[in-house]
Amino acid sequence: MSRPLIYAHRGASSYAPENTFASYKMAIEMEADGIEIDVHKSKDGHLVVCHDEKVDRTTNGKGYIKDLTVEELKLLDAGSWFNESFANERIPLLEEVLELVKMENILLNIELKNGPIFYKDLELDVVNAIRAYRLEEKVIISSFNHYSLVAVKKLESKIKTGILYIAGMVSPWKYAKSIGSDAIHPLFMTINDEVVKECIQNDVMVNPFTVDRESDMILMKNIGVSSIITNRPDAGRKVFYGI
């Protein structure tokens, strides 16, 4: 059985402020196979990498990303909330992350944050950015908004998509196939070996989140998932490689 790939959830976010270059670079140093990020749009239409709709939790600023310009967002300190040693880390733009991914030759999972706030042309803008860097084969796009995944596939069939969900879904491989998705991205505790087996047999990847405990990583490895999404890529390497 081949070992699962390791996606660093918002980077190595157990050790550095999430969705910052400090976190991404730490994940690369820990030899993660890829990183997972979240994308919104700024007031002036830039693709902004941040998990929440608001900047309040992870920066020294306040307000919704949709109400702030890229210039205003780039002034924010996105590191001090985690630890003062990360002071002056900045909110990345998608283009900056794509440049890093291309340079480091790693994989990228982009989560489209398209709801409860809906961004006009988010799917089109993200697909065009991926095309500009010729990273169609290196990216998988996930979202809890499955309409966004359908839209992505219509725009660019070469880009893989994965359905995010947190419920115990019946026959998720059938649903994924029905909307043209390549993968399921379930909350890890909602799946079992039967779900994984059926997905893999039907050419649907299984990429559960957020798998941080080593005991859960061992379980995911044993039931044959395609990858794990984790805040602790170093722990993933320890479980999957024994180092």
Image (cartoon, helix red, strand yellow):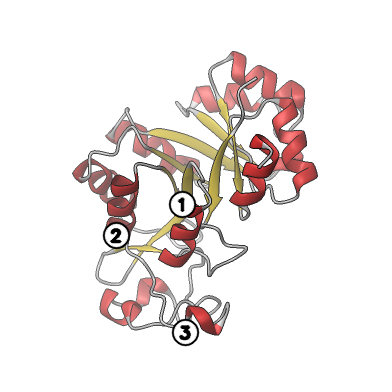
> Where does the image place residue 202, in percent across and percent down from the top left?
57, 15
Q: Which mark is residue 53?
A: none
Q: Is residue 230 left or right of residue 148?
A: right
- At x 63%, y 28%, the residue is 172
Question: Within 10 angstroms of label 3, few (less than 14), some, or many (20 or more) residues?
Answer: some
Give the image quarter of residue 225.
top right
Q: Is residue 73 left or right of residue 78?
A: left
- At x 29%, y 59%, the residue is 96
- Label 3's element? loop
**Residue marked by disc 1:** 28
Query: From mark 2 to mark 3, how far is it between C-alphas?
Result: 23 Å
**Residue marked by disc 2:** 96
Work out whether residue 127 can be spotted: yes
**As drawn, 128 above or below 78:** above
Foreground residue among 134 and 68: 134
**Residue marked by disc 3:** 62
> Where does the image place residue 112, in percent across and percent down from the top left?
43, 51
Q: Are marks 3 and 1 in contact (CB under 8 Å)?
A: no
> Which of pointers 2 and 3 lies earlier in the amino acid sequence?
3
> Which of pointers 3 and 1 lies earlier in the amino acid sequence?
1
Foreground residue among 88 and 122: 88
- At x 31%, y 51%, the residue is 98
